[in-house]
Image (tube, coloured by chain):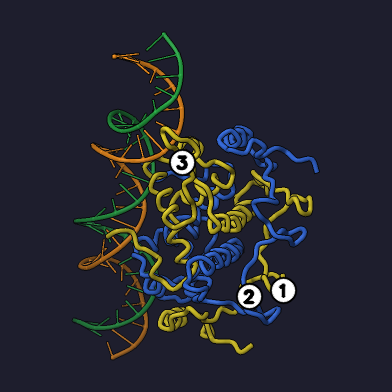
Chain colours: A blue, B yellow, C green, D orange
Amino acid sequence: MQRTTFSAQHCSVARTLDIIGEWWTLLILRDIFYGVRRFEPLVEQLGISRKVLTHRLKRLTEENILRKVPYQHNPCRYEYRLTASGLDLLPVLLVLMRWGDRWLSEDGQAPVEFVHADCGQVSTAKVVCAHCGGELTVRNLRPQPGPGAVLEEIESMRSASVNPDLFKKIRL
Amino acid sequence: MQRTTFSAQHCSVARTLDIIGEWWTLLILRDIFYGVRRFEPLVEQLGISRKVLTHRLKRLTEENILRKVPYQHNPCRYEYRLTASGLDLLPVLLVLMRWGDRWLSEDGQAPVEFVHADCGQVSTAKVVCAHCGGELTVRNLRPQPGPGAVLEEIESMRSASVNPDLFKKIRL
DNA sequence: ATCTTAAGTTTCTTTAAGAAACTATAGCAA
DNA sequence: TTGCTATAGTTTCTTAAAGAAACTTAAGAT
């Protein structure tokens, strides 16, 4: 009767959420992106219990999203830095922020905005097709089994869906 | 001693996670995006407990991410459909999937891929600047207080950070 | 010798998750 | 009439996780 793990599913959303979908985890990462790297400041900034913070930092370090870097000796103290895969979570935070700005802030009054140094403008994140740069919508995306698919799971999802063509392989 | 709510923070990431960051929620939304709209199929497809599914569907409906649509009378039965704000969560799922494909699937064998009907290619999601279309990275983004900022929170984050210029207002 | 700082541990209480049985409503079948 | 099925939940009981607050450890500073 422990909490169900998502990592058994052959689904990248499920596998990702199994790691970063726990309560507090993405807020911890947000703070680390802002440069809050040490235990005490994270406790104070987040208002998280020390026990939970300990667990989350341990898990994220095990999953190679954070790494501990010593910043002092005698006694040795560590801070938490983002690894390459951790840095690659920035788009996740940007997209969550974008959604909250749109749907949860009063009259679109965003609490934080980003200046994009490359173009000099206040920037909002947009998710596009890496190939053509066009918008990705429910209408123009056709999911199909990928190379890592498990056919029983695909079949099961198809039969549970109102869309009978779901996951039908498309000839390009 | 109930679970801490994130919605008090003036941060769109926190507010968003307060709603869609609960255990199971994004997987429920994934299934609904795939067309699994009814209670029983969701239970079977996800392997979620009926109690938790009930709670999550109720919350998502209250938050106007889903709405109940009757599909039969005598007895009246409802299915759950995405609202406009719910449909706008597609980018969140695409970005989570992209991260999992990159970092969690064996040799990049994605379980699911999407054909982008507009360009005809197998598409991966990419997060770019809505203004110039350029990449958004830790290096080229300068966070600054937005119109909905609360100065004490901004100051608190700045002083907890290793970056003394964090949230320094930029003159464009 | 005691104080302080940083990073946790430990203990205790409450809440949430999971499993499985139970309920409600109505159509249909014998 | 009685009973079976389907769908969408409720209820009950057990275990795990979250939260609050006190405690620990280690070493330099006062």
Instruction: Indicate which label's residue lies in the foreground, 3 or 2.
Output: 3
Q: Residues within 10 Å of mark 3 (few under 14, many from 20)?
A: some
The disc labelled 2 sits on which kind of residue? Answer: Ser
The disc labelled 3 sits on which kind of residue? Answer: Tyr
Q: Position of residue A38 (x, y in %)?
A: 44, 72
Q: Is residue A76 visible?
A: no
Question: Which residue in the protein does label 3 denote?
Answer: B78
Picture residue at 42% right of the left edge, 37% below the top: B76
Parent chain of label 3: B
Q: Is residue A78 visible?
A: yes
Instruction: Indicate which label's residue lies in the foreground, 3 or 1.
Output: 3
**Disc 1 element:** loop
Q: Are marks 3 and 1 on the same chain?
A: yes
Question: Which residue in the protein does label 1 denote?
Answer: B132
Picture residue at 51% right of the left edge, 52% below the top: A17
A132 or B110, which is in the foreground? A132
Question: In the image, is residue A21 above or below residue A27?
Answer: above
Q: Position of residue B161 (x, y in %)?
A: 48, 79
N-term-proximal mark, 3 vs 1: 3
Task: Using residue B7 as the reference point, say whether residue B113 is left or right of it.
Answer: right
**What separation in Å lies between label 1 and label 2 (alpha carbons)?**
9 Å
Tell me where residue A159 sits by quadrant: top right
